[in-house]
Image (cartoon, grey):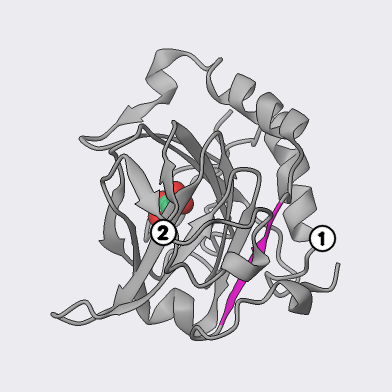
Amino acid sequence: MDLSNFRILGVPATIYYIPNFITLEEEDCILKHVYSVPKPKWTCLSNRRLQDYGGVPHEKGMIPEKIPDWLQEYIEKIANLNIFDGKKPNHVLVNEYLPGQGIMAHTDGPLFFPTVTTISCGSHTVLEFVENNEKRDKICDLLLERCSLIIVKDDMYTNYLHSIREVDSDNVSGCANLNNCTTKYLLNEQLKRGTRVSLTIRHVPKVLKIKLF
Ligand SMILES: O=C(O)CCC(=O)C(=O)O
């Protein structure tokens, strides 16, 4: 796959957006696995739920845990894009957002290799990038359609904050990647959010030698 075809132009370096990275059948399969785990696998936060696969990243090093085969398939698919400087992703964070839920502005920080990839399942969302300053000046909004993959690297990874607003629907008109999307949206079209499950797939460089099963 020639990634340069998927680069989002007009935003700081570097974002790639690949619509239909997975099929609807693959999306269905991911959702079935995500929702078939025992309850304690979920970590419940005030504004979303999450699951960790591969271990819990820590500044002293991650204690590695085996990633289930159903997830390994998507790790391979992303590793084949050669965006991790020859390293293979070893951590997956699953986030579930109900309509109206989101995530506060943050950077992914030094625990991860400075590349982050996210597959969206079940619903679209809008990811917002802002300056890392007091004013939080807006850089861009990106529409993440279901089944898409977004790759964030370089300056966009290190120097800008990203967030998802806590709203039920999104006006997609201002999104910087509309030309790269699968659908042609109407001016000021408002998209109602459903439940979205995202898989954030990254490489954690600092891994301890101990193994948990
Ligand atoms: O769900 C997403 O698309 C973003 C997740 C995220 O930013 C994170 O988990 O750090």
Name the amino acid, label 2: Asn
Q: Position of residue 104 (x, y in %)?
A: 25, 55
Name the residue beneath numbered marker 2: 188
Indicate left or right for 75 with 186 as reference.
right
Q: Where is residue 4 in the image (x, y as percent from the top left)?
A: 76, 79
Q: Which residue is drawn at 34% across and 30% down?
A: 43
* Crowding near the residue tagged with mark 2, few <14, some 14–19, many ≥20 C-alpha atoms within 10 Å: few
- Asked if the residue at label 1 sits under 8 Å from ligand 1, the reply is no
Picture quadrant of residue 31:
top right
Q: Which mark is residue 80?
A: 1
| 93 or 192: nearer the viewer | 192
Asked if residue 91 lies in the magenta stretch, the reply is no
* Extent of the magenta region: 14-19
59 shown above or below 179:
above
Question: Which is the main secondary structure of the residues drawn in magenta?
Answer: strand
Few, some or many C-alpha atoms within 10 Å of disc 1 (few <14, some 14-19, many ≥20)?
few
